[in-house]
Image (cartoon, coloured by chain):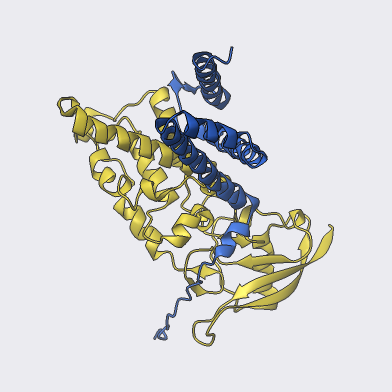
Chain colours: A blue, B yellow
Amino acid sequence: MAEEVSRKPYVREMTYRWIFRHPRYMRYMAREFSCIFIGAWTLMMVWGLKQLAEGRASWDAFLEMLRSPWSIAFHALVLGFSLYHTFTWFNLTPKALPVQVGEAFVPDVVIAGAHYVAWAMLSLVLLKLSGAF
Amino acid sequence: MSERLVELEVLRYNPETDSEPHFQRYSVACREEWVVLDALNQVKENIDATLSYRWSCHMAVCGSCGMMINGEPKLACKSFVRDYDGVIRVEPLAHFPIERDLVTVIDDFMDKLARVRPYLIPKQEKPVSEGEYRQTPAELKKYKQYSMCINCMLCYAACPEYGLIPKYIGPAAIALAHRYNQDSRDGGRDQRQEEIAATEGAWECSFVGACSEVCPEHVDPAGAIQQVKIKSTVDWYTEHLMPWLKK
């Protein structure tokens, strides 16, 4: 006759330490964290629009603020995080958007590459519209 | 044949006597070609017969011997001892309750797997006399990668979303649902969508991508989940903005 087996499963609590378990989790957190900087920059732009609506003096003061060393440092930081955000997401696009032609799938580099090309083209259009060249 | 003394540090838990797990160290003389599973078998056969763990095929097919090896979800039968320096720490798969030693409670995964209906639901049943459900090589290629899943649950142990939100259906179950949704012979997508297009389905995933990195069969569950998200989004827009397109 079989003996009665007692069950008492042990549940391990998950702590914040999972982030440090492997570099991939740090990279993921950095990617997620980058949106805070992009969000902050967007808020700053909204504030800039408000200054524009308030008249010439407010707008000039806003432009002056943008030229300050703090602002330049902030923009460098935002640019770094934005690029990290963009590259990490663009490099993931082949997973989300596989394209099958006949039996074969279009290589990942083509799908990610198309995003980079579109990004460059749109940036050029924006720069042209803003009178940069 | 060259042998090397390897220190194995194994997480032990006996539900009848222990209030919490503890590590136990074993010195095991390992051959050059041994995998961690061989070392565990050596412990079981010659050092400590009370050690419990799951295994079956010893060839990365059955998916039974998933465990944390130096903190990474691995198949013990596919992890060569020679690839590790120093002490090899072996623990049960993360995010699952421990039944005993390296054996985890997998009821949650089994339940979720059943919920996504991971089997062919033909569009139209036909009698055997009418022949097979035929498919072109291109149609096979569309889902073949996702059919390689061996249910080893390494992806669940790698996924922090599953660890933090246990209700999440998880990578393997969604990838398998996607496998059948992509199959030209299948007509069960609407039934599966109720599970995988829900908040606790694909939308719980924030694309950490760890599941695909640890998958021993290169199934790429993370890719499957993102594709489910896109298709679910298209479904929503079709239903709300272009209802006439819906069958």
Residue drawn at 45 percent across, 47 percent down: B206
* Residue farthest toward the top in the current orientation of the protein: A133
Q: Residue at x 31, y 37 (%)?
A: B232
**Foreground of the two, B41 or B172:** B172
Q: Quadrant of residue B190?
A: top left
Asked if residue B135 can be seen in this view, the reply is: yes
Q: Residue B154: image x %, image y %?
A: 53, 54
Is residue B215 visible to us here? no
Number of numbered callouts drawn: 0
Could you tell whether B54 is left or right of B241 in the image? right
Q: Is residue B54 above or below residue A93?
A: below
Q: Where's the C terminus of chain A, which quadrant?
A: top right
| Residue that sits furthest to the right in the current view | B2
> Residue B89 versus residue A118: which sits nearer the camera?
A118
Residue reaching furthest front?
Answer: A57
Q: Quadrant of residue B227?
A: top left
Residue A15 horizontal side relative to residue B140, left or right:
right
Q: Which quarter shows the N terminus of chain A?
A: bottom left
Against B230, is B105 above or below? below
